[in-house]
Image (spheres, rainbow, N blue to C red):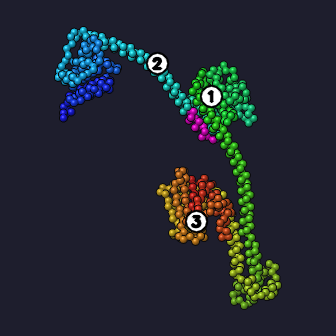
Amino acid sequence: MSDIRKLPQVLYIEDSDEARALVRRLLAEKFVVLEASDPLDGLELAEETQPNLILLDHNLPNMSGSEVATRLKQMLPKTPIVIISGDTSKGARERALAAGAVGFIAKPIDDDFENLITEYLNGKVEKLDHAERYLQAYQQELVERLEGNIRQLSSALEKNKHLLSQNEKMFSMLDRRHKLLQTAARVGQMVTSILSLDDLLKHTVNIICSEFNFYYSGIFLLSDDRQFAELRAGYALAGRKMLEAKYRLPVDEQSMIGKSILTQIPQIASDAEHEQSRFKNPFLPDTKSEMALPLIVDSVALGALTVQSNQLNAFSEDDITSLQAMSEQVAIAINNAQLMKKLESANSELLRTKTYEAIATATGEAIHWVGNKAAPIPGSVSRVREDIKYLITLLASMDESGLENESLREAVRNVREEAQNQGLDLKSILEEMSAMKPNRLQALISVESLMEDLEIAENSANTILEIKEGLIGPARQRSDASVSLKEMITNTVENMGLPDDAVEMGWEKDLPLAHGDVRQLEQVFNNLIKNAWEALTNANVTNPKITIAGCRDNDPNYVLVIVKDNGPGIPKEIQEKIWVSFFTTKGGKGGTGLGLSAVMQIVNQHGGKIWVESETGNGATFYVRLPVEK
């Protein structure tokens, strides 16, 4: 088997796949066959590979075989070139040899082809008679082809120049259209995100003039009676002057603004000075072109947008299309802003009504609670007064002479004198007591009974004070500052005296400081932890546990604190009620029902949020989100 590295290389430049396949089959045994289907590719391949022989078809695309042969001869002067051609016309062989080929093989090639190639590789050169004549003819052919190519190139160049000019215009137009549509989309996006009507209108006219490079823009909205278009926003100094003058136009056909609102069709004046329906605005004397675009939502006109230029014919079709698209967005944004304003007004009225209802309800509830808690006090006081009367009577009836201490004797005399001053008939009271049965008398002068009555009165009074604190506490004037929730909650837990293993805490590293009133925030977490512990102990939970965790909220402007217990949980049906004032699940165990109500009020006043997640039997988790210190 031959070593392929030692075989001679033959380059065949031919655009026919079938012809290349035939040559490859005939030469593959003794030669390395390189192929190119295009003359330019062939020239590049010949320069790169430096073949031993080049076979060249005469009829090639873009260049003739003779032209390629001439180029190859300059590039590779020592490499033999053989023209293969189906051209049997007179002089075909001679022209090929004149171009620099060493041989000419006519198509179709036969089985002797391999021997011919070997001969050319071995130095065979076909002789050309009358070479000068054929060389001159070949040069003339090259000149004619060159002239033809120049004419084609010149024609193509002119066409390309025209096409380039057209393309530049088209690209410029497309670029402007793209920028206009992009600007319109950006303006639409910007204005639809603004819900304040005044801000929306001002931003819109400023954006239109700055982005579209127009002389003036203004927005008119219909008056309440829909008889006038009132200017609500205007660009630059002219706009400010018109706003100060409360500029408005009747909704009629005497102005482009009025006509666009009436017809709901855009009005365009490319030469504003000669436009019959255009109102001559003294504030805008330099206007040369004007466009009035109706602002319509659901077939209802809200007003109109005016765009003016100090250039004639300033509005292209693209300008009109873009501005119309933008005006639709502006109309929607204006409608949204108006609806928002109405909604805010309705919400304010509803809130005011609900506030009055809540105040009335809370007042009634407060009166009811205070009444319930105050009810035991008069009875207890009455019993205490009666007990004190009997005790004073007993003390005043004592024979002070039997007392050794003068101070005690003096005290008895003082009690007797005060009893008389208070109108107590000591004699009658003694007779009444003497007539009592022993057990009745013992009950009347019982110190234990007296202390019980005092405790009842004291507990009732304290409960009333707690209610007062729950109602008024969150409304006290705040003293906001930076608050370390980790430090504050840790101290709160320590001061509550809970068992050492009852509370577990975990805090995110570099937890930001919260912003708020430390005293009120202490009240929030004290209530939550206290409620959790009471829920655990009342339910006799085995291994009661409260977990407290602090981390940055998904919104980096807030910090989140989670208070979780493993208690009985809060039933779904009362999870909304626990925030209502005076609602309590503790029954007669002392709860006022104001703890969570006050907690929510404090958190809301701090600009935060509190909520609960719970399932019966799986504990309760309270989430408190508070703003961070900035």
Between residue 150 and residue 382, name the one nearer to us.
150
Q: Tell me residue 167's x, y (percent).
A: 48, 23
Q: Which residue is mark 1?
A: 307
Q: Tell me the distance, in whole angstroms, between the alpha carbons under discs 3 and 2.
A: 84 Å
Please name the amino acid that badge 3 sits on: Gly
**Mark number displayed over residue 617:** 3
Q: Quadrant of the N terminus?
A: top left
> Which secondary structure lies at badge 2?
helix
Q: Tell me the distance, in whole angstroms, between the alpha carbons under discs 3 and 1.
A: 67 Å
> Which secondary structure lies at badge 3?
loop
Q: Tell me the distance, in whole angstroms, between the alpha carbons under discs 1 and 2.
A: 36 Å
Rendered residue at 74%/61% (across/down): 364
Q: Which residue is mark 2?
A: 162
In front: label 1 or label 2:
2
In primary-sequence order, the first of circles 1 and 2 is: 2
**Residue 187 is covered by the magenta coloring:** yes
> Which secondary structure lies at badge 1?
strand
In primary-sequence order, the first of circles 3 and 1 is: 1
What span is in magenta?
Answer: 183-195
Please name the amino acid that badge 1 sits on: Val
Residue 106 located left or right of residue 520: left
Vertical order, 120 against 581 (above or below): above
